[in-house]
Image: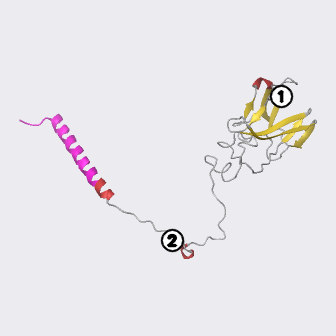
Amino acid sequence: MGFSKDSCCVFMLQLLIVVYLVVQCFDVQVQADLNATLVVDASQASGRRIPETLFGIFFEEINHAGAGGLWAELVSNRGFEAGGPNIPSNIDPWSIIGNATYINVETDRTSCFERNKVALRLEVLCDGTCPTDGVGVYNPGFWGMNIEQGKKYKVVFYARSTGPLNLKVSLTGSNGVGSLASTVITGSASDFSTG
């Protein structure tokens, strides 16, 4: 009685599986018995001298490690530059406050800054019949803004208007409700004034 080709293949496969399992069990036992030691010598003598000709750095912006991280920026996309030189630019993560039918929001290239010509343009369409809470834009920051009680925060913006200004600037809770601080800025028609 001889072995068929199929039964021989099945036998070899079973044998291979058994050998594999035995090796794995032995390997786990050997791995469990290993110990490792890491020695760090932080003395002055162990340090390497950095040449005076070495300068520069490589830095990759991942997950807002720079803006919003090392660079303690609170407002995400503060200069509306996220879309690059394209107009209209991407204003994300900025969003509209209130009823969007009362306001047009877009970017254009009329900024007062030479290095970033992109500006946010708000056209309020309510002509005195705005909703009680008004309309505008808000910014959630980088996964929120770490606003701390007792600290001072400086909000700077530049506004240009063809008519009187009546702007309310607020820091609110993460849900957009509950004002932590706010101020109203009024003015007449102007060509770029600081708020």
User: Residue shown at 54%/71% (left/top)?
Assistant: 42
Location of residue 68 in the rendering, given as x and y in whole percent from the top left corner: 67, 48
Please check the rendered image and state whether residue 148 is part of the magenta-colored stretch, yes or no.
no
| Count of number-bearing discs | 2
Say the numbered circle drawn on residue 124. 1
Q: In the drawing, does residue 39 fall left or right of residue 30?
A: right
Q: In this rendering, is residue 192 above or below 65?
A: above
Q: At 79% across and 28% down in the image, what residue appears?
A: 104
Task: Report the residue marked by disc 2.
Answer: 41
The answer to which of 85 and 113 lies nearer the viewer is: 113
Helix, strand or loop for disc 2: loop
Instruction: Give the amino acid type for the residue marked by disc 1 in the picture.
Output: Val
Using the rendered view, name the quadrant where residue 33 is placed.
bottom left
Work out whether residue 175 can be spotted: yes
Residue 54: % across, % down: 64, 66
* Dominant secondary structure (helix, strand or loop) of the stretch shown in magenta: helix
**Nearer the observer, 140 or 55:** 140
Q: Which residues are magenta?
A: 1-27
Residue 13 part of the magenta segment: yes
Q: Residue 19 at what x, y percent from top left? A: 22, 48
Q: Secondary structure at mark 1?
A: strand
The structure residue drawn at horizontal position 72% and vertical position 44%, both measured from the top left corner, is 75
Amino acid type indicated by mark 2: Asp
Residue 167 tag number: none
The answer to which image quadrant residue 27 occupies is bottom left
Kindly identify the residue that appears in the image at 66 percent across and 64 percent down. 55
What residue occupies the far left of the structure in this picture? 1
Q: Residue 107 at x, y = what percent?
A: 78, 35
